[in-house]
Image (cartoon, rainbow, N blue to C red):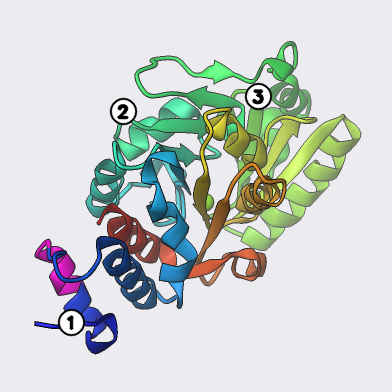
Amino acid sequence: MNLTLASLTQDQICTLAALGFGGTLARSALKVAILDAMSAIAGGAGGGAVLAPLLDEPARAAVLTDIDGTLAPIVERPDDAAVPAPARAALERLIGVFGLVGCVSGRRAAEARRLVGIDGIAYAGNHGLELLLPGESEPQLDPSLLGRERQAADFLADHGGEAGAGADLRVEDKGPIQALHWRGAADEKAAEARAHEIAAEAGRAGLEPHWGRKVLELRPVGGGGKDSAVSALLGTDGYATAVYAGDDRTDLDAFRRLRYLHESGELDAAVCVGVTSAEGPREIAEEADLEVEGPDGWVRILESLAG
Ligand SMILES: [Mg+2]
């Protein structure tokens, strides 16, 4: 029997992979074909070629992912978010295959671990201000924050807390970061306008405003960012390749850091996966190497990486 990749449909390739078929076709070529098939299903094209470098030496590859909007569908209230079982299963299958599996989130690191439900991977929480490594029970706080842990909370308290924020903005206390949400507010436009006023005041008070999907975050100056989170996770462990997936503006920082690490020669390959949605920023697709539709699209890519 003489099979060639070109002779197979995407469904046939996926069926072969599901059966563990690998004798006739070289495993790496088969994997590239699977990735192409899966990325096409997920709404992207050419994903196999883009992601193939990760499969050359998986033990030296890092798979990094945002959580909300990337692994877990966006919901009205962040407390109601859940990582679907297929996403959790796909991540678990990557452990031990890839050198590093890590989640990057704006949530507290411990909250991110609880939400994903896997202890054996790394979590960079609070946009990189907290690092919770596999096996550790307490996150490490970014030492540059020493003495400024309550700066954002004190600012809001001085302005009357949640009541002072007004316009139906909901305050989320994330320790060194304070988040103001307007998703689900009675008048979202009025709440967003009020958030812009608060951001301007916070800027004058020496805080950094950061914008996400229907959320304003107030952070200490220089306080983290998903670019810092990516660097903290990759550390000095000599990873050769890395992929990062995200859906929001804050993830663009991670994209740009990965790209910088590639251009400076620290990574042989860096892949940015944009998880798109109707309300997500346009830049996510513009700056991504590979675009997928929603968390389902990214999970299918993770499943294909697990082989
Ligand atoms: Mg997100």
Instruction: Give the magenta-colored segment's residue range.
Output: 14-20
Determine whether 284 is above or below 80 in the image: below
- Which is in the foreground here, disc 2 or disc 1? 1
Q: Horizontally, is 8 left or right of 102 in the view? A: left
Structural distance between the alpha carbons of marks 2 and 1 = 41 Å
Query: In which image quadrant can residue 5 be found?
Result: bottom left
The residue at which mark 3 appears reads as: 176
Structural distance between the alpha carbons of marks 2 and 3 = 24 Å
Q: Residue at x 51, y 47 (%)?
A: 241
- In the rendering, at what x and y percent does residue 222 appear? 77, 31
Q: Amino acid at mark 2?
A: Asp
Query: In which image quadrant can residue 234 be found?
Result: top right
Q: Amino acid at mark 1?
A: Leu
- Is residue 257 visible in the rendered structure shown here? yes
Taking the view exactly as shown, the residue that stands out farthest to the top is 147
Disc 2, disc 3: CB below 8 Å?
no
Q: Residue at x 59, y 65 (%)?
A: 288
SS of the residue at dot 3? loop
- Is residue 292 visible in the rendered structure shown here? no
17 falls in the magenta region: yes
Q: Residue at x 68, y 53 (%)?
A: 191
Q: Ligand 1: does it lie within 8 Å of the C-beta at label 1?
A: no
Which numbered circle lies on residue 3?
A: 1
Q: Earlier in the sequence, mark 2 or mark 3?
A: 2
The residue at which mark 2 appears reads as: 119
- In the rendering, at what x and y percent does residue 26 appear? 25, 66
Disc 2, disc 1: CB below 8 Å?
no
